Amino acid sequence: MTSIPAADTVLVPTVALYMDLHRHPELSGAEERTAARLAGWLREDGLEVACGVGGHGVVGLLRNGPGPTVMLRAELDALPVAEQTGLPYASPTAVMHACGHDLHTAALAGATRLLAGVRDDWRGTLMVVGQPAEETLIGAQAMLDDGFRDRFGTPSAVLAQHLIPMPAGMVAHTSGPMLAGSLTLRVVVHGTGSHVAAPQHGVDAVVAAAAIVMRLQTVVARESSPGELIVVSVGRISAGTAPNLIADQAELEVTLRALSVASLARTEAAVRRIVMAEAAASGCQRPPEICVESRSPVLVPDEDLTATVASAHRDHFGRPRVTTAWPSLAAEDVGRFAESDVALCYWMLGSIGRTQWQALSGSTAERLAQAPPNHSPRFAPAPGPALSTGIEALTAAALTQLTTA
């Protein structure tokens, strides 16, 4: 394999890109500025660039002779979180890159520049994808529905990474299921409105919704094996318009996570059964509506590809910097690109800088537990070490798959 160029040569502009993206986050489906920044960078490196794919998706192609098509992917969207990091480049709005997608995108840009600079050493096509709407788990499918494969081809391998709270400079791989399959359901409970002074004339949608919320807790506690990793969470509930009215409607959003297709299907069936039964028990005159808002598959990295990439990472970074990632009930939709026998390699990237790590106390496990997690308003990756590692990790992985010139 071609030796990996050091990220130092591109670190200054990629850190500047990262800080700019961090200061100007955009929610899922609204990533217009972020997409434009990535597209402009890719054009500077000589890629053919298409924008507006499945929303604000960006696809760049660097054709470099006959050989495989290797896809590198990062996410563009941020979260509705008000930042509390105190960083000089913190977001000034109630939107924040609290999951590290800004750093993923900057690392993708940096890896592309490194690979473009050594194109005499490899052959094939580099496919660079900036995906929108990952947080809502619909962006990958939206890009596929927009003719992704017909327009740009089917890659032989998909490579992606994600920040987690572990020391910056480290990467982590796993075998078997890595991230959960996810399903989000929107439930609308239909009651009958009335005056609060005469509740007997109505069916209180708030009470029915509360009964559903409480009963759903038994899906994990009493219908699943204690050894199964399953989550059922009601993330949002909305009902009522005034304190003196019995609400005639309540809306809930329920997220389900599991590490196997069978567990997720069984959990979905239990949730649907409970929603219908509790609505009926409450006397609702109409059955509730249950709509699927998003669905993503269990993320299972390809065993052979992962072994190859992990070996390249150990060779480049040294064995102590490459560790094992444990399965998580976090979810990703990048697996959509890897369906139809396309190999996927996905690894974790450390985010905690030395100063932050030294400020924590206790054992390694205790320090990791104290660090602000993804989606926290205090999540603050260390740009230098995390970004340089992300750039080189992507570059090393790509070079394992591109044909040596």
Image (spheres, rainbow, N blue to C red):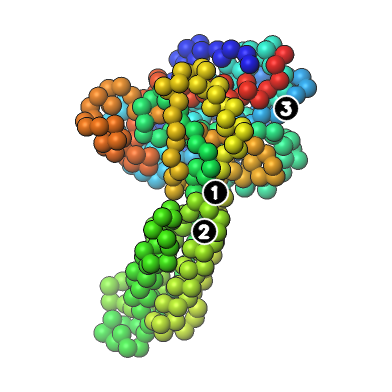
Q: Identify the image quadrant of the N terminus.
A: top right
64 relative position to 363: left or right:
right
Residue 336: image quadrant is top right
Tell me if label 1 and label 3 are in contact, CB under 8 Å. no
Residue at (32, 88) in percent of width and height: 200
> Cα distance, mark 2 to mark 3?
34 Å
Q: Is mark 1 on a helix, strand or loop?
A: loop
First in residue order: circle 2 vs circle 3? 3
Residue at (29, 39) in percent of width and height: 369
* Number of on-image labels: 3
Q: Position of residue 146 (x, y in %)?
A: 68, 45
303 relative position to 209: left or right:
right
> Cα distance, mark 1 to mark 3?
26 Å
Q: In this view, does 186 lie above or below 211?
A: above
Question: Is residue 13 in sight in this rendering?
Answer: no
Q: What element carries label 2?
A: helix
Q: Identify the image quadrant of the C terminus.
A: top right
Mark 3 highlights which residue? 68
Q: Which residue lies furthest to the right in this view?
A: 66
Residue at (33, 24) in percent of width and height: 353
Tell me if label 1 and label 2 are in contact, CB under 8 Å. yes
First in residue order: circle 1 vs circle 3? 3
Q: What is the three-letter code of the residue carrying label 3?
A: Pro
First in residue order: circle 1 vs circle 2? 2
Instruction: Rate crowding at label 1 as few (under 14), some (14 to 19) or many (20 or more) other CA atoms within 10 Å.
Output: many
Residue at (67, 39) in percent of width and height: 342
Q: What is the three-letter code of the residue carrying label 1?
A: Val
> Cα distance, mark 1 to mark 2?
9 Å
Q: Position of residue 157 (x, y in %)?
A: 65, 33
Q: Position of residue 188 (x, y in %)?
A: 46, 70
Mark 2 highlights which residue? 264
Mark 1 highlights which residue? 298
